[in-house]
Image (cartoon, rainbow, N blue to C red):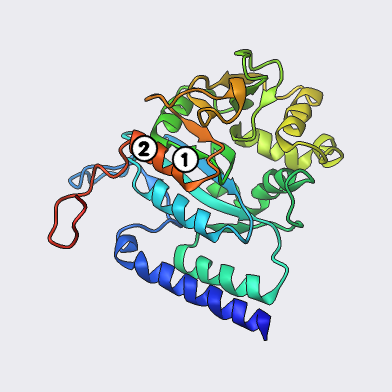
Amino acid sequence: MWPQRLLLAALLSLTILLTSIFFFTLHYSPGSSLHSSESSQELVPQPTELRLLIGILTRFGTIDRRHLLRLAYSVQPSPTFPAVIDVRFVLCNLTSSDQRLLVSLEILRFNDIIILNCSENMNSGKTYSYFSQLPAIFPDTEKYDYVMKTDDDTYIRVLPLVSSLRARPRHDLYYGFVVPCMSMDPFKGYMSGMGFVLSWDLVEWIRESEIPKNNTMGPEDKVVGEWLRLGSKGKNRWCEKPGMYDYPGTNGRCSHGLIEETVAVHRLKRMDMWVRVFEYFNVTKGVKPSRMYHLD
């Protein structure tokens, strides 16, 4: 009886959540790409200049965080150049009929979830499963220039990110926030798991090479750096500092104050942190006066 009550409560909460965003999502489908905007008078399709997959590693129980991130990404401005940016939530295999039912509702509504063939974990191979399974999920006709791995406690600002990537090589690229925190040398250390980018050829190498396959245990970001070192890969590297950082005051020298040129803010563990970040970047500036609501 008790599991049934939990399921009913979860379904009710999800129903309320979906109903509450119905009018919002009429003009936005998270399962779609965040395409660059083009003039309505433009008749000739422009070639895509950049294709980026942002994979947010998450788990079944964080549906509220996924909803928050859907809102956060949906209101961001699109690039001014031809680009496709796909945002997907990445889970491992679901373990119960309750989980499969509820995630199926998310898939039906949003179509923005990837379920990998793995057991849910943090530092026991999920990141390897993510990169190694992507080439089978996305055939050659749908492959990306870049793939990002990030977490659900990170806020990515898409426009600064793709503007930075636009100037980077499309081959053998390893991009992110280099650890140790005070270093600016991307060839020493590794890129923090807050959010790092690999070019598609490195994703294919991870799938094919024995080096990652035989070395999946341990802190996932450090392990990826070790793969690239052992394989002599990632010769094109970029340290995105100070644009990527941990939330102010949360992680010593990896943290600093919020800045306009932010690409990513990490360690957003509480709602008040998200609120502060949203306020700083004025994400609700597009709200227009209306008789429908009173916000003063």
Q: Position of residue 96 (x, y in %)?
A: 71, 72
- Give above or below for 250 relative to 27: above
- Residue type at numbered disc 2: Pro
10 Å neighbourhood of mark 2: few (<14), some, or many (≥20)? some
> From the viewer's perspective, is the residue at label 1 or at label 2 nearer?
1
- Number of marks in the rendered image: 2
Q: Position of residue 162 (x, y in %)?
A: 44, 32
User: Which residue is the site of mark 2?
Assistant: 82
- Residue type at numbered disc 1: Met
Q: Nearer the viewer, residue 288 or 133?
A: 288
Q: What residue is at 54 percent from the left and 23 percent from the top?
A: 169
Q: Contact, CB < 8 Å: mark 1 with mark 2?
A: no
Q: What residue is at 57 percent from the left and 20 percent from the top?
A: 238
Q: Which mark is residue 273?
A: 1
Q: What residue is at 69 percent from the left and 66 percent from the top?
A: 94
Q: Position of residue 84 (x, y in %)?
A: 43, 43
Q: Is residue 48 visible?
A: no
Q: Is residue 100 visible?
A: yes
